[in-house]
Amino acid sequence: MIYYVEDDMSIRELVLYTLRNTGFQALGFEDGKSLFTMIKAGNIPRLILLDIMLSEEDGLDILKKLREDSVTRKIPVIMVTAKDTEYDKVTGLDLGADDYIAKPFGMMELVARIKAVLRRTDDDNDDKEIYELGPVSVDVKCHVAKVNGEVIELTHKEFELLLFLMKHPGEVFTRDALLELLWDYSFTGETRTVDAHIRTLRMKLGEGADIIETVRGTGYKARVKI
């Protein structure tokens, strides 16, 4: 889930629309108060897009609070602002922002920045060694996948695909997003590569194949409950 704090409703809705149509789940907030209300309720996002120029509390003050709280300290934050001065950029980064993008920005540039930050922070923060979902388990350190305790033979890319989906249960990823994240390329028509790997992966998972769900017209996700 990505949270976007922006008091301009038209900009907020456009960004949320783009994120949802590129495989992300996203919610918008008009101020820091509503953001923290959601977080205090236990709804922790994977990343926060935070505008600096807000009508109430400004984004830099919100960022400072996020970094001072042990619950939110490690949430990746990308600062979004109409200001393009070196001072704002340096201040935001010094306070712990993970990246910075100035308005006006292209939607695809924003999506690319988000993906880059998520790849970097997921790698930095991931100290979990074993992921389990239904009858399927993946041992990251030993590079072993099992179904009902039995080892299954996977190719390197099949293992990466399975591990990636299991790391983000319930989150929908488009075929294009998976291509960019796991194959590092995106070409029209090449989404069949993803479909082919999903198909062989399901065959090898056997009784555990149901952990991978096809989201019609969008892509794939790992089921939250099996």
Image (cartoon, rainbow, N blue to C red):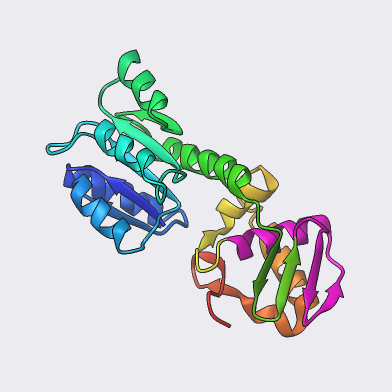
Q: Quadrant of the C terminus?
A: bottom right
Query: Compared with residue 148, is residue 81 higher up or lower down, i.e. above or below?
Result: above
Q: Residue 151 lies in magenta, yes or no?
A: yes
Name the residue: 45% across, 42% down. 76
Q: Residue furthest left?
A: 55
Horizontal arrangement in the rendering, residue 95 relative to residue 126 (left or right) = left
Horizontal arrangement in the rendering, residue 226 relative to residue 147 (left or right) = left
Q: x%, y% of residue 97?
A: 41, 32
Horizontal arrangement in the rendering, residue 155 relative to residue 164 (left or right) = right
Name the residue: 35% across, 33% down. 79
Q: x%, y% of residue 14?
A: 28, 47
In this view, the residue in front, 118 or 39, is 39
- Whether residue 150 is visible here, answered yes or no, is yes
Q: Residue 32 lies in magenta, yes or no?
A: no
Q: x%, y% of residue 13?
A: 25, 50
Provide the residue span drawn in magenta.
Answer: 140-167
Q: x%, y% of residue 223?
A: 55, 75
Query: Compared with residue 211, is residue 159 higher up or lower down, i.e. above or below?
Result: above
In this view, the residue in front, 25 or 21, is 25
Query: Compared with residue 161, is residue 208 higher up or lower down, i.e. above or below?
Result: below
